Image: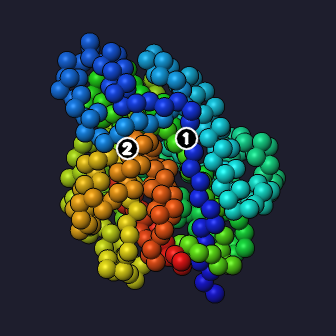
Amino acid sequence: MHHAAALLSLATAIPPHQFHQARVLEAAREVLAPRYPQFDTLASLFANTGIRHRYGVMPMEWYLERRGWPERTKAYLDGAEALFVDVARNALEQADLAASDIDTVVTVSSTGIATPTLEARVAKQMGFRGDISRVPVFGLGCAGGVSGLSIASRLAQARPGSNVLLVTFELCTLAVRHDELTKANIVAISLFGDGAAAAVLRAGDGGATQIEATGEKLWPDTLDVMGWSVDPEGFGVIFQRTIPDFVTEHMGPAVAEILARMELTRSEVDRFVCHPGGSKVISALERALSLDQGTLDHERDVIADYGNMSAPTVLFVLERARRAGLPARSLLTALGPGFTASCVSLRHAA
């Protein structure tokens, strides 16, 4: 018998330090402009993102100094542990569960390295059982929120009645580089923030919002579109500004292909819930999905309030859509390194 996984709860969390976009631009100019003559021609990127403010795990002063792997890793571990506990406890409370009720935890993050992984580091503080199944996932980037939900739903479906906790967090600001005098680095500085999201899923006993189907599309020969390079100072962003063009050309056919495998059509989707990579990506998504301009309103609001937090961002959008009232069927979409489109169909009973 097919048991769909139900979404029992959804929570989000942000770190304590808020950065207004104008202040980020001012700080970036102070640090980079003296060594990078092209900076002023790229400064308009900061205004064109649609971002008002975003959040970071460290105070602004921390980012004004050059940092290496040890400092970045310490900031990642400290910041990620605090966010994990905050958002996971919120999700558990919403689901009326204790940490000891969780059978499987899926941890999704691509912005730092931790071994043991984060769910093990916080296990005692959280109160996880000793026999909990741990599924850490690295490398999905901006697709991690949707792909993580897909993975968690399949694990819940495989063991009906078990409780699966998904936690995704990204500390994108820790990848700020002083030595990378490139357009890609300026784009990253103008866009990225930190945040976390968590959800509890269970299959076998119903639920108002169910994961109906999942699907992905991987394009060959697209490794240079998005990702990390790794060098002695830290992660370096691989980020092509052609992403909006790629979305406009490829996302519509990809979604149609994924929906066909789900035995659904575009007309059966009542709402798209998209990872908002930036204002230009949102506009490209509306064109690619044949949506009226302005349709992706929650996406624009999330970008304005938090910036692009990579994997958790689409779950921030879903949280707003849930508060506003989900229609019968929503399709979550995200694009990430690979280059990959990931989709999850949600079926909601009012």
Q: Is residue 227 among the parts visible in the rendering? A: no
Residue at x 52% of width, y 30% of height: 17
Residue 227 occupies quadrant: top left
Which residue position is annotated with label 2? 304
The earlier-in-sequence mark between 1 and 2 is 1
Q: Is residue 192 left or right of residue 59?
A: left
Q: How many C-alpha atoms fall within 10 Å of the one at disc 1: few (<14), some, or many (≥20)?
A: many
Mark 1–mark 2 Cα distance, whole angstroms, equals 14 Å
Residue 311 rendering spot, x and y as whole percentages: 47, 50
**Left or right: where 286 falls relative to 66:** left
Q: Is residue 294 left or right of residue 13?
A: left
- View extreme (bottom): residue: 1
Pinpoint residue 114: horizontal percent, then vertical percent: 61, 38
Tell me which corner region of the image, top left, top right, bottom left or bottom right, holds residue 209: bottom right
Instruction: Tell me if residue 134 can be seen.
Output: yes
Residue 14 has which mark? Answer: 1
> What amino acid type should be assigned to the residue bearing mark 2?
Ala
Secondary element at image label 2: helix
Q: Nearer the viewer, residue 335 or 70?
A: 335
Q: What's the colour scheme?
A: rainbow
Give me the residue at 74% from left, 62% from top. Answer: 96
Q: Hey, what amino acid is under mark 1?
A: Ile
Q: Position of residue 76 (x, y in %)?
A: 57, 32
Position of residue 282 measured from the top left corner of the image (x, y, whole percent): 29, 54
